[in-house]
Amino acid sequence: MLRYQENNELHRDFHGTTNTTLNYIADHYGVDALKMILRKTGHDVYKSIREKLEKGDASELIEHLNWFFYRERGKYQLTVSEDEIVFEVLECPAIRHLRKLGLEPSQHVCLQTSEVNAGMCEGTPWHSEVKVLEEGHCIQTFRKEPSHDTK
């Protein structure tokens, strides 16, 4: 079962708080500090996903991506093979909600995605990459190294 599958009331306004926090940290402590915090968040907060990835098992990552984008009615396509997960976000629910609130998305919003993903993959046979195609549209790719031994 997905550890992070929240079923309570959805409060999308947390996107506004997160957006402001990204800007605050970058402005006051620098982008390197922001990257460190985001990567540590991916590594520590999503520990159970990372632990499964360490064993070569991407099932919880796949469930996590599906659940949160489904829950927020994000538009996406997910393609899964044994050694690659391609998660194309066609409409980012965070950016959509920020625009609805009248807020300018932080220039670091996609950095958040790439660093959290990297943190989840740290120390595992999986690596992540985020390609931003346009605002709210990106391709997140997770690839498993073929020569990496799993535990």
Image (cartoon, rainbow, N blue to C red):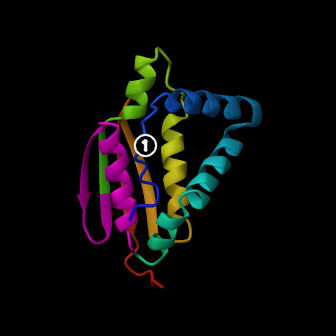
Residue occupying the point 45% across, 70% down: 53
Question: Magenta stretch: residue 73 in it?
Answer: yes
Along the viewing direction, whichever of 100 and 2 lies nearer the viewer:
2
Along the viewing direction, whichever of 118 and 76 lies nearer the viewer:
76
State which region is magenta.
57-85
Q: Position of residue 103 (x, y in %)?
A: 50, 18
Mark 1 is on which residue type? Asn
Q: Is residue 149 above or below residue 39?
A: below
Along the viewing direction, whichever of 148 and 37 lies nearer the viewer:
37
Residue occupying the point 55% across, 34% down: 108
The part of the image, by quadrant, that contains residue 85 is bottom left
Residue occupying the point 58% across, 60% down: 43
Residue lying farthest to the top in this orientation: 102
Looking at the rendered structure, the secondary structure element under dot 1 is loop
Answer left or right for 63 relative to 17: left
Q: Position of residue 132 (x, y in %)?
A: 39, 39
Question: Magenta stretch: residue 19 in it?
Answer: no
Residue occupying the point 45% across, 78% down: 55
Q: Position of residue 6 (x, y in %)?
A: 43, 49
Which residue, given by chain and number where applicable, does mark 1 sit on?
Answer: 8
The part of the image, by quadrant, that contains residue 143 is bottom left
The part of the image, by quadrant, that contains residue 1 is bottom left
